[in-house]
Amino acid sequence: MKPCDRNIQKTLDLTRSMIELANQGDEDRADNGCGILYGVLLDSAYRIQKLAEKEKKAHIQKGWWNPDSQQKP
């Protein structure tokens, strides 16, 4: 996998972790301030994920992304 594609994949992996943390943090929150924090984290994760997916699709359309080499580094 090319370094640019690997970085996009890492970004997608990171957003999945961000979403999991935001959901867990919201379940465990003690007050409204925590709710705001995890809401912002969740919103940010989805925005970043959307951008990364768009970039991944662009790389696929250009023929740069090799779907057979999506192994994690």
Image (cartoon, rainbow, N blue to C red):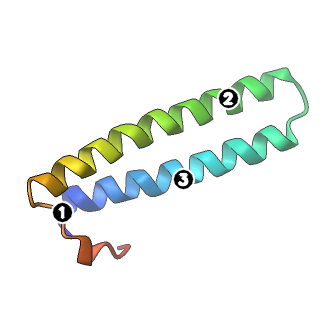
Q: CA distance from mark 3 to mark 2?
A: 15 Å
Residue type pointed to by label 1: Trp
Q: Secondary structure at mark 3?
A: helix
Which residue is under mark 1? 65
Q: Of 3 and 60, which appears nearest the observer?
A: 60
From the viewer's side, name the closer residue of 13 and 67: 67
Q: Which mark is residue 39?
A: 2
Which of the 4 image quarters holds residue 64? bottom left
Q: Earlier in the sequence, mark 3 or mark 1?
A: 3
Q: Position of residue 11 (x, y in %)?
A: 39, 51
Can you identify the residue that label 3 sits on?
16
Of the image marks 3 and 2, the number of the one nearer the N terminus:
3
In the figure, is residue 14 to the left or right of 40?
left
Q: Residue at x 79, y 29 (%)?
A: 34
> Along the line of sight, which residue is nearer the eye, 17 or 49?
49
Give residue 51's position: percent from left, percent from top.
34, 38
Amino acid type, residue under disc 3 in the picture: Arg
Q: Where does the image place residue 12, in percent across and percent down from the top left?
A: 42, 53
Q: Position of residue 54 (x, y in %)?
A: 29, 42
Q: Residues within 10 Å of mark 2 (few under 14, many from 20)?
A: some
Label 3: how many Cα within 10 Å (few below 14, some 14–19, many 20+):
some
